[in-house]
Amino acid sequence: MKTIMKTLFVSIASLSLMFSVNAGELSVSGSAKATYHITNGQNKDNGIGITNELNFTASGEMDNGYTWKYSMELDPTTTGDTATSPSNTPPGGALNDDTHISVTMNDLGTVKVCVSECSNGKEYAFDQSVYTSMTDTGLSEGITYPASESSYASLQYHTPELPFGTTGSIAYGQQKKDGQSGNAQGQANGNSIEAYSLVTKPIDGLTVSGHYYDIQDFDDGITTEDQLEEGGSWGVEYAIGNFTAGYGKSYKAPEVSGITAGATSVEYYENTGISLAFAVNDALSVSYTKEDGEVNYQTTATASYDIGMTSVQAAYSLGGATLSIAQADYDNVGYADGVDAKDTIIAVAFAF
């Protein structure tokens, strides 16, 4: 951790050499998307939704050629509370939930300060789905993925591009709240994270990605912690002509306070994914994705059931809009035997 902190703070300290910053520009981005969501196997109505997240981005250049970027996303809450106190957020109220500032120092790389943002995880690096990752929708299938820097307030350093298109990052993060403002006091003492990532492109069409993290445990007085949390992910993607294939794995070993025979303490989660995509023509693309989520308990006496997901998707470009349909079948939702579901999403998205 000392090496990480030294690297990050030396990079940040170098910014003191800058004498002035030119006025930046502000832009707003996002997407206009409407969806119709059909779920079978769960007691739910069909869902009609519209995207509601906007990303406000400011950027500029310093006198020494360094560039900076600020990003803040507004995302209305779907829950909130109905209390009348001004300090409470009603349902639908916009929240500042993902924010970061980055400074690119030419050939020295990039320094980032992030709150609820800047994940370098590679759990979806394999996924070539033409609409969306179907384990990241409104249906909670229960697959457990590794944690990432975006779950913390983090300081990060990203290398410039190295030979073979290689880039890497290191990060250190602490407890946070969404929208944590400048001059904010630190949160209550808790765990922190160290994380590392690497992406390389050794030959045309091939991309190899990896990410690893471990949780630095806060000394909370518990002396029976037999396992501290760590995890990671990696993925391989290869594109040739109109065809793209991906394969990857992700792991998470959760913190465990004790091992008891026959108990349901998890030793680790392991996820395996394979994904194929094909561009039929300039307008139509199709994909097939299969992912399995495996749970491994501390003792073999505990029965385990793996989550399985298969998804078929298609996306058709209409010029300024894209029409997509995605369907997925899920087995053993929540690692529970025989709990199955099917999801169908129809979406139309407009570019702006």
Image (cartoon, grey):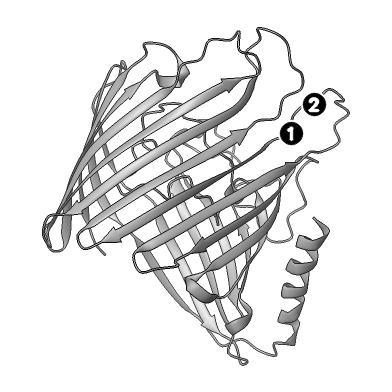
Q: Residue at x 48, y 37 (%)?
A: 90
Above or below — where is 322 with respect to 226?
below
Q: Quadrant of the N terminus?
A: bottom right
In this rendering, would 283 be left or right of 74? left
Please name whichever residue, 3 or 47, is drawn nearer the observer in this view of the structure.
Answer: 3
Name which residue lies at 59% across and 67% down: 101
- The residue at which mark 1 appears reads as 228
| In the image, residue 197 above or below residue 336 | below
Q: CA distance from mark 1 to mark 2?
A: 7 Å
- Measured as percent of width and height from the top left, residue 316 is found at 13, 52
Pinpoint residue 65: horizontal percent, then vertical percent.
58, 90
In this rendered view, identify the residue nearer to me: 211 or 154: 211
Give the residue displayed 43% in from the left and 46% down from the top: 124
Vertically, is 158 above or below 306?
Answer: below
Which amino acid lies under the numbered mark 1 shown in the image of this protein? Leu
Q: Under tag 1, what secondary structure?
A: loop
